[in-house]
Image: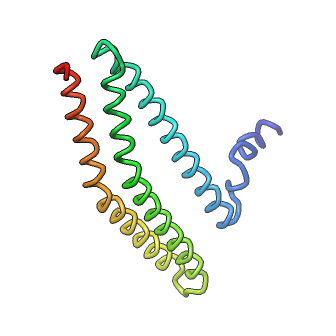
Amino acid sequence: MLVVLLPALLAGPAAGGTEQERLQCLDRVRRDYGVCVREAQDRCRQDLEGRLGRCFGSPECPNACLATEKDCSKQPLLERDGCRLACQADGRVGQQGCRVEVDRDACRRTVRVKAMKCKEQCNRRAAPAIQRCRDGSSECLRACAHGE
């Protein structure tokens, strides 16, 4: 009997739960995925910083380039993330409003598409500034390679 129940227990309350429980589970999984991606990016960034020093004989010059890029990107990333949070909040409000709609599914789809477009717009607005920071970092690293 335990063998039969084990998959249901491992799946958690969303397996066969209410729509609200399934949506909450989906939110948790997406949030956990985002954390995982950010942690992987941090690990990769640390690996990059460690390995760049070996390319140049010492880490000072390349690490200075990366630090400058990080400082340069800070404000555009904060603005992008704030914009995306506003899109997300608007999406949540929109989803709540769908509860009173006759065609809830259509309403939810419309709200999701609108939130997705909003987030894409946030990314597009921030992209040029972030790219300038990356370009500056690339130029800096090339200067390090030239011994400047």
Q: Position of residue 138 (x, y in %)?
A: 23, 34
Instruction: Report the residue at 27% width, 41% height from top.
Output: 134
> Given the current orientation, which residue lies at the most extreme front position?
148
Instruction: Report the residue at 50% width, 74% height from top.
Output: 90
- Displayed quadrant of residue 83: bottom left
- Displayed quadrant of residue 102: bottom right
Q: Is residue 144 above or below residue 17?
A: above
**82 with respect to 142 (left or right):** right
Query: In this orientation, which residue lies closer to the viewer: 96 or 1?
Result: 96
Query: In this orientation, which residue lies closer to the viewer: 28 or 131?
Result: 131
Query: In this orientation, which residue lies closer to the viewer: 124 or 143?
Result: 143
Instruction: Report the residue at 43% width, 30% height from top.
Output: 44
Image quarter in which the C terminus is found: top left
Q: Position of residue 32 (x, y in %)?
A: 58, 46
Q: Is residue 45 above or below residue 18?
A: above
Q: Position of residue 121 (x, y in %)?
A: 33, 65
Q: For the image shown, how many numbered marks are present on the structure?
A: 0
> Given the current orientation, which residue lies at the most extreme right position?
1
**62 with respect to 106 (left or right):** left
